[in-house]
Amino acid sequence: MDLETLAKNLKWRGIELKVFATKEEAADYLTQAIKGKRVGFGGSMTLEAMGLYEKLKPANEMFWHWRQDMPADEAKAKAYLADIYITSLNGVAETGELVNIDGSGNRVAATLTKHEKVYFVIGENKLAPDLHAAIDRARNIASPLNAKRLHRKTPCAVKADHCYDCKSTERICRSLNIIWEKPMQVGACELVLIRETLGY
Ligand code: SF4
């Protein structure tokens, strides 16, 4: 992956790139950058591994349905309306497209609606050479691993080897979103890339 090419391709799409060697450095950067805000989180093993919720909480009002601070549906609704939204991605193309697959849709929907800023935080394992490869990664690597993590009764959850395009009622893949450019209602959009393997 050529990070200069990625940065250039993100820039014309209205998305800034920041690169950090470790999740601790990225968490320090975000903790300094976000203060006094209402902050919503999407479900993300990357954010969990960073301990970012706990790091931001002292200086911000936080909404995350993975924490017990309020009912999950209330947390999702408040995150949707927050000043800042932070989540991860299932695939990022060197050509600049951002790819996410979602089940309940809260994470994808919140990245498209009105916020001062949306941060996407990813490990370098999410990078792919082009849009086709980023979608392929989201469908055949990220989603089966997430289905396995969630103990879903889907064919992919057995070996997490690839997507079977299942018809299961427990299917977690209900929508596929590609961000071609910064959504119009989002004030600013930033990709925080960590040079580690994080999340799925
Ligand atoms: S569509 Fe079904 S088989 Fe494919 S990754 Fe999603 S849950 Fe697994």
Image (cartoon, rainbow, N blue to C red):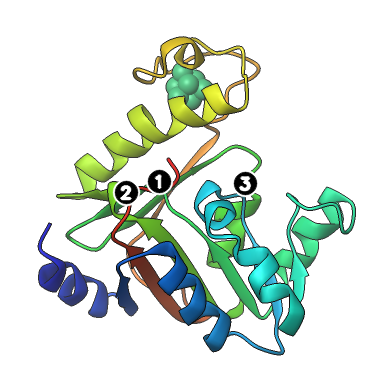
Q: Which of the two residues, 77 or 126, is positioned nearer the viewer here?
A: 126
- Res 60 visible: no
Indicate the amino acid at tag 1: Asn
Percent position (x, y) of residue 6? 18, 67
Using the rendered view, name the quadrant where residue 61 is placed. Answer: bottom right
Q: How many marks?
A: 3
Query: Which element carries disc 2, helix, strand or loop?
Result: helix
Nearest to N terminus: mark 1 or mark 2 = 1
> Residue at left 62%, top 27%?
150
Disc 2 + disc 3, Cβ < 8 Å: no
Query: Which element carries disc 3, helix, strand or loop?
Result: loop
Name the image quarter holding the C terminus: top left
Question: Considering only vertical position in the picture, is 94 above or below 177?
Answer: below
Q: Mark 2 or 3, which is nearer the eye?
A: 2
Nearest to N terminus: mark 2 or mark 3 = 3
Indicate the amino acid at tag 3: Gly
Question: Considering only vertical position in the picture, is 158 above or below 138?
Answer: above
> Residue at left 55%, top 57%?
47
Using the rendered view, name the quadrant where residue 2 is placed. Answer: bottom left
Indicate the amino acid at tag 2: Lys
Name the image quarter holding the N terminus: bottom left
Q: CA distance from mark 3 to mark 1?
A: 14 Å
Identify residue for label 2: 126
Identify residue for label 3: 105
Q: Is residue 183 left or right of residue 168?
A: left
Q: Mark 3 or 1, which is nearer the eye?
A: 1
Disc 3 + disc 1, Cβ < 8 Å: no
Question: Considering only vertical position in the picture, is 66 above or below 167?
Answer: below
